[in-house]
């Protein structure tokens, strides 16, 4: 499963049901309106930039980190 499929599945579920979880990947909810995030692994940090996704007329920001297998979500308000 590629990154786009993972993001589509997780963001659609979150927008439609409010459930921020996935069976295969970690899902982390960020504060509202966040479009970037610094992900730390040990002492190393890297910037994660969230993209806008839309379902049912609602928007959300989301990104996938292949480094930690984590989906980051932020509500767009």
Image (cartoon, rainbow, N blue to C red):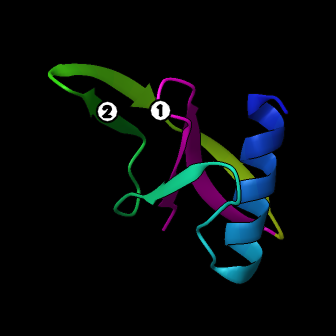
Task: Pick whichever of labels 1 and 2 is earlier in the sequence.
Answer: 2
Residue 74 colored magenta? yes
Q: Total marks drawn?
A: 2
Q: Quadrant of the N terminus?
A: top right
Q: Main secondary structure of the magenta part?
A: strand
Q: Nearer the viewer, residue 20 or 37?
A: 20
Residues tagged 1 and 2 counted as in contact (Cβ below 8 A): yes
Q: Nearer the viewer, residue 68 or 8?
A: 68
Query: Looking at the image, is mark 1 or mark 2 nearer the viewer?
Result: 1
Instruction: Tell me how far mark 1 sits from mark 2, CA to CA.
Output: 9 Å
Q: Which residue is mark 1?
A: 68
In the image, the segment drawn in magenta is 57-77
Residue in the image at 51% along x and 64% along y: 75
Relative height, residue 5 to residue 12 (above, below) = above
Residue 51 coordinates in the image, percent (x, y): 59, 37
Residue in the image at 53% along x and 55% along y: 27
Res 43 label: none
Residue 42 coordinates in the image, percent (x, y): 20, 26
Residue in the image at 57% along x and 25% along y: 66
In the image, taking residue 34 as reference, residue 6 lies left or right, namely: right
Element under disc 1: loop
Corner quadrant of residue 28: bottom left
Q: Which residue is mark 2?
A: 39
Relative height, residue 56 to residue 6 (above, below) = below
Corner quadrant of residue 35: top left
Residue 49 colored magenta? no
Relative height, residue 72 to residue 44 (above, below) = below
């Amino acid at each position: 499963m590629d990154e786009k499929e993972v993001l589509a599945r997780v963001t659609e579920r979150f927008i439609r049901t409010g459930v921020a979880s996935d069976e295969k990947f970690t899902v982390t909810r960020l504060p509202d309106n966040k479009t970037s995030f610094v992900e730390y692994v040990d002492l190393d940090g890297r910037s994660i930039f969230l993209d806008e996704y839309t379902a049912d007329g609602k928007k959300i920001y989301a990104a996938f980190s292949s480094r930690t297998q984590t989906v980051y979500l932020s509500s767009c308000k």
